[in-house]
Amino acid sequence: MKKLILSALLTILTVGFTNAQLTEGEVKYTIEASADDPSADDPSMDMAVALMQGSKMAIYFSGEKARTELDMGSMMSMKIIVDGDSEKILMLMGGMMGEIAIPSTTKELEELEENDDEPEVDLELIDESKKILGYTCKKAILTNEDGSEIIYWYTTEIEFNRIGQTSMSSEVPGFPLEFEVNQGGLIMSFTATEFNETLSDDEETLFSTEVPEGYTVMTMEDMKGMGM
């Protein structure tokens, strides 16, 4: 169960490594978890769904800085802060493993990605549209090489650039305001409920890449060694 949820989390986090081309803003999402087959008798899946109740995500951006926050119910929380000006990145994790901080740089991540096999993905653009928060969104289905799917509803009315990242979401030609991830039978549906063109907190606090007091510091190589 733990491995399934962590795998889904890391798939989702690729969406957060983005920086909108607006001057500043924030997007908040609700998250609904469910089983791909509700009739299946799978206690571990039922527990995973229960643990994820009340989950939410928020993306904040300003200039070359971005912050993604994932609060996965009672399971765990993750924050990723990217400072494109200094090329610094900080990942903060809290939950069953304690409080862990992983400082890094965009250069280090690019070097790690160069040493990994780039996953093959298949993107299908669907001729369907709907309105989300007043924005016209189109549908796209992205299928990973392991068969997992992400269904996106994206808008081209909000453009964005990646900050030193290569992610599956970069295949989608727009900013996702709704998306659904199916990872090993665990479905997580993200829906944007609020979009603001101003930040609700000061930039110095939101985009600080200093490791907070009380966190155990690990490296990206340490995380790779743990299968992440």
Image (cartoon, helix red, strand yellow):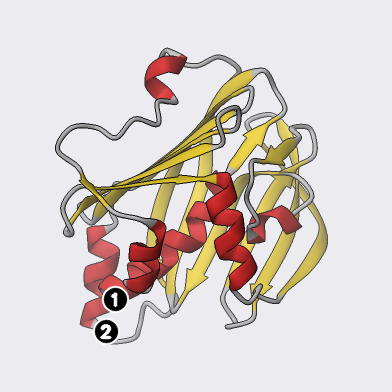
| Local SS, label 2 | loop
Residue 28 drawn at (x, y percent): 48, 34
Q: Is residue 72 visible?
A: no
**Kind of residue indicated by mark 1:** Met
Apparent side of residue 132 relative to residue 86 in the rendered image (left or right): right
In the picture of the structure, the residue carrying the numbered disc 1 is 45
Q: Is residue 76 above or below residue 209?
A: below
Apparent side of residue 145 relative to residue 212 in the rendered image (left or right): right
User: Camera-side residue: 155 or 213?
Assistant: 213
Image quadrant where residue 69 sits: top left
Query: How many residues crowd mark 2 within 10 Å: few (<14), some (14–19), many (20+)?
Result: few
User: Camera-side residue: 105 or 29?
Assistant: 105
Residue 116 drawn at (x, y percent): 59, 73
Image quadrant where residue 122 sits: bottom right
Residue at 67% of width from left, 18% of height from top? 23
Mark 2 vs 1: CB contact within 8 A = yes
User: Camera-side residue: 177 or 60?
Assistant: 60
Residue 47 drawn at (x, y percent): 21, 70
Q: Which mark is residue 210?
A: none
Q: Quadrant of the C terminus?
A: bottom left
**Kind of residue indicated by mark 2:** Asp
Residue at 63% of width from left, 34% of height from top? 19
Spatial separation of the CA atoms under disc 2 and disc 1: 5 Å
User: Camera-side residue: 115 or 162?
Assistant: 115
Residue at 45% of width from left, 46% of height from top? 104
Residue 31 drawn at (x, y percent): 41, 49
Query: How many residues crowd mark 1 within 10 Å: few (<14), some (14–19), many (20+)?
Result: many
In the picture of the structure, the residue carrying the numbered disc 2 is 42
Q: Quadrant of the N terminus?
A: bottom left
Q: Is residue 40 visible?
A: yes
Image quadrant where residue 56 sits: top left
Apparent side of residue 205 relative to residue 183 in the rendered image (left or right): left
